[in-house]
Image: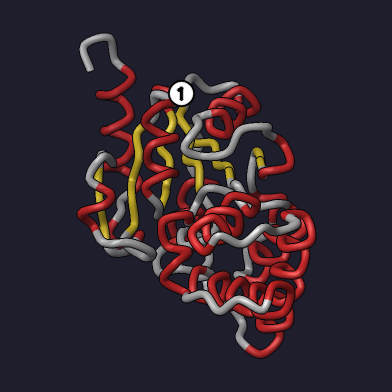
Amino acid sequence: MQWAMIFDVDGVIADTEALNARASVLMFEQLYSTRVQSEDFREFVGTGDERYVEGVAEKYGVTIDTEAAVERRRENFFTLLQNEPLPAMDGVLALVDAAVQADDCLVAIATSGNKNKQFPVIEGTGLDRSRFDAVITGDDVTRKKPDPQIYLVTAERLGIEPARCVVFEDAPAGVEAAKAAGMLCVAVTSSVDAGKLQAADIVVDSLAEVDIDGLRELVASHASPSG
């Protein structure tokens, strides 16, 4: 049985959430003279770059130029990144290695972020994008998470039915998208509390807790007629 692992980036491959929020707080101060809090962005984690800034703007009643806001946030992010390299999340490199080496497993990235931001982040963790069978970003879809489109597009690109895919997510919107796509979901508590991730099939504190053989068995049960 061929199956697939699909990884989100922020909070799953790389620990970017704190830096994303700081870059966004700075953007609101620079462009709109508005002081917002890092915590304001938590509910918009995983919803895509545009919604991430628009959601907080709505909370504060600020009218923004979304394109300009996203671009300034990106510039701030990379300025901060120069002094604060982002390590790979615990366990992810070993899990990707195991997936790449397995004869029956395809491996992909599906992130709501735009490629001009996400590609450097992926490579900064030491992962070569050429190791993945598919890399789908927010540039490849018209609807962002929690809509399942990005995961359905990824499954189509891989040539794997959704029931044979395991998604790795850290945000409620991402978990909702994965389940709506008919996929299994492993949620990591890197960005929000476990209580907000209960819709996932498995919730872990670290991907070091995840075993590829266990995932293979889970997929076989999920994809079977009686599963």
- Between 97 and 152, the residue placed more toward the observer is 152
Point out residue 23 in the picture as x, y percentages from the top left corner. Answer: 62, 75
Vertical side of 160 occupied by 190: above or below: below
Q: In the figure, residue 52 lies in which quadrant?
A: bottom right
Query: How many numbered marks appear?
Result: 1
Residue 29's x, y, as percent?
Answer: 65, 79
The C terminus - image quarter: top left
Return the residue found at the far bottom.
83
**Label 1 secondary element:** helix
Horizontal side of 85 relative to 114 (left or right) equals left
**26 or 74, which is in the foreground?**
26
Q: Type of residue at label 1?
A: Pro
Instruction: Specify the quadrant of the image occupied by residue 73.
Output: bottom right
Instruction: Tell me where residue 225 appears, x and y as whole percent.
Output: 27, 9
**Residue drawn at x 61%, y 22% as measured from the top left:** 156
Residue under label 1? 162
The correct choice, above or below, for 35 with respect to 13 in the image is below
